[in-house]
Image (cartoon, helix red, strand yellow):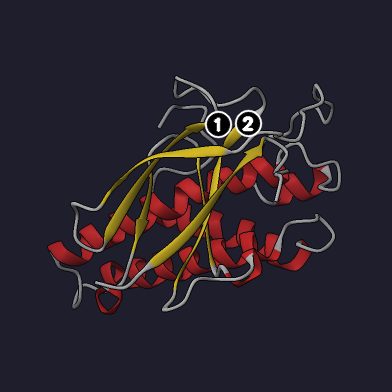
Amino acid sequence: MSTTDFIPGADAQFNTFQSVVVNAVEENAELWVIPADVVAEIAALRAKWEAAYSVVENPATKTSVAVQAKKSARKAYEKQLRLLLKSYITYNPKVSDEDKAAMGLPLHKSTRTPVPVPDTVPDVTGIDRNTVRCISVSFRDSGSDHRAKPAGVQGAVVKWIVSDTPPTSIKVFTNSLLDTKSPITLDFEEEQRGKVVYFALAWQNTKGEREP
């Protein structure tokens, strides 16, 4: 990490930082207009991180496997935490400077050049199933012959569901993930091997807006 990175590098300090930030997000999600699925996703990643961290903090349970699990949990959690802050906190006029200071975040100007709501969709260009319990989905902008994202777009949101029958509405898709670069990787549980997964993608801009 660079010396200007506001997210602490040491695990102990990171654990304190993330707790303060996510507690504030959960308490103020409605006021700050943060979607429920975004809050649920970050809460799930937080739970995985805190569970893995607690294992390595106990000398009796700290093993090389536990340390690797902790590193993987932090990597996934920190990635989404950064996206959450960028999309819904940093330039959100509903989040006051006092709120940001209380969370240990840097202050930025609240005005930005208007960003349009995406009017195109990501096309799926490939699906890689070579890794066990994992699917990598490659994507690019509809009608484009290169991998660059449309102007103002932060990344692609993928929603997915493992189901025995084709879903009839996007509302039933229970999982969601935002990735800023193709491909996007979906991980599954052992008991889901051999089952069918349905997914749908949409572009999301830097303000957290997307088309259905």
Residue under numbered circle 2: 153
Identify which residue is drawn at 70% across, 44% down.
210
Which numbered tag is attached to residue 142? 1
Identify which residue is drawn at 46% across, 49% down.
78
Identify which residue is drawn at 36% across, 69% down.
196
Could you tell me residue 37's position as x and y percent? 63, 64
For badge 1, the amino acid type reads Ser
Identify which residue is drawn at 61% across, 48% down.
84
Q: Distance between the residues labelled 1 and 2?
A: 13 Å
How crowded pointer 1 is (Cα within 10 Å; few <14, some 14-19, many 20+) is rated as some
Which numbered tag is attached to residue 182? none
Decide which of tag 1 and tag 2 comes sooner along the chain.
Answer: 1
For badge 2, the amino acid type reads Val
SS at badge 1: loop
SS at badge 2: strand
Q: In this view, does 152 lie to the left or right of 113?
A: left
Between 190 and 63, the residue placed more toward the observer is 190
Q: Relative to 81, does residue 67 appear above or below in the rendering? A: below
Q: Relative to 148, does residue 195 appear above or below in the rendering? A: below
Could you tell me residue 127's position as x and y percent? 32, 46
Between 162 and 182, the residue placed more toward the observer is 162
Q: Quadrant of residue 67?
A: bottom left
Q: Relative to 3, does residue 23 appear above or below in the rendering? A: below
Could you tell me residue 53's position as x and y percent? 35, 66
Between 96 and 167, the residue placed more toward the observer is 167
